[in-house]
Amino acid sequence: MRILRLINLALLILILLVVLYSRAFANDKYNFRQTKWGMSKEEVMKSESSEPDHIFSKGDTLAYHSEIFGEKVLILYKFSFNKLVWAKYILSKYLFEKGKIIEGLPIIDFGKFEDILKKKYGKPKDNGTKFKTKELRDKLRILIESGDGKESTELMDKSIREGKAWWYSAWESKDTLILLHLHGNKGRIIFEISYASLLLKRLTDEDLL
């Protein structure tokens, strides 16, 4: 119990330092939309013009619906000790998938948003495609090298949906990690653009990638 209290105390001190840092540089740009890391739930709610989505807003999470670059999105804000630690956009057309999504469209969308983020943050610090198995990676490489675009696109789309492959690009600003992430689960596409405080993201148990 004593160790747990010490850990909690250390986390609270870390949050206090980040809040003080943010206030000291109040003229800096916002970290995400009209918010800065360390803000409380109440402050974040005041920054949004609409009401939270009460289905997705649970516990330490606030959710809103909006639109960016012509795409409808679900916005998630994550808090720890009532301080904002990360936030993300999730493309609604994949989250609330209705009907069949054209094969290859998620990859096209990835390129579109990667270009948008490059214009703002420059060259990614890290990017690429990850595979669960070497066999899948080699099979896709052979298909691409053979010029079979249709079959390679179908296999990549299927692999992403099944969680066997994922695409990502990552940037870092002064105090924020930005991650563009295309992955999947149980046959569904998950397309996210995540923003996390470099100092506070360890306060949650969620791995952004």
Image (cartoon, rainbow, N blue to C red):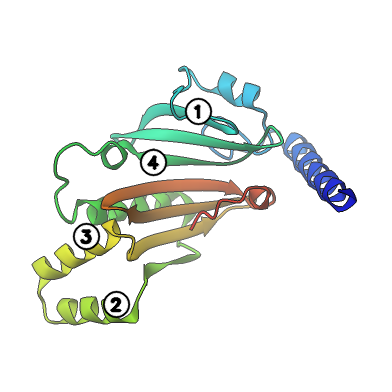
Residue type at tag 4? Ile
Q: Are marks 1 and 3 in contact (CB under 8 Å)?
A: no
The residue at the point 21 percent across, 61 percent down is 158
Residue type at tag 2? Arg
Disc assigned to residue 90: 4
Secondary element under disc 1, as helix, strand or loop, is: loop
Residue topped by disc 2: 137
Q: CA distance from mark 4 to mark 1?
A: 14 Å
Disc assigned to residue 157: 3
The residue at the point 37 percent across, 71 percent down is 132
Q: Is residue 78 above or below residue 1?
A: above
Count of numbered tags: 4
Task: Count neighbours of disc 1 (C-alpha within 10 A) and say few if under 14, some if 14 to 19, many if 20 or more.
Answer: some
Front-most of residues 118 and 184: 184
Front-most of residues 73 and 117: 73
Q: Are marks 4 and 2 in contact (CB under 8 Å)?
A: no
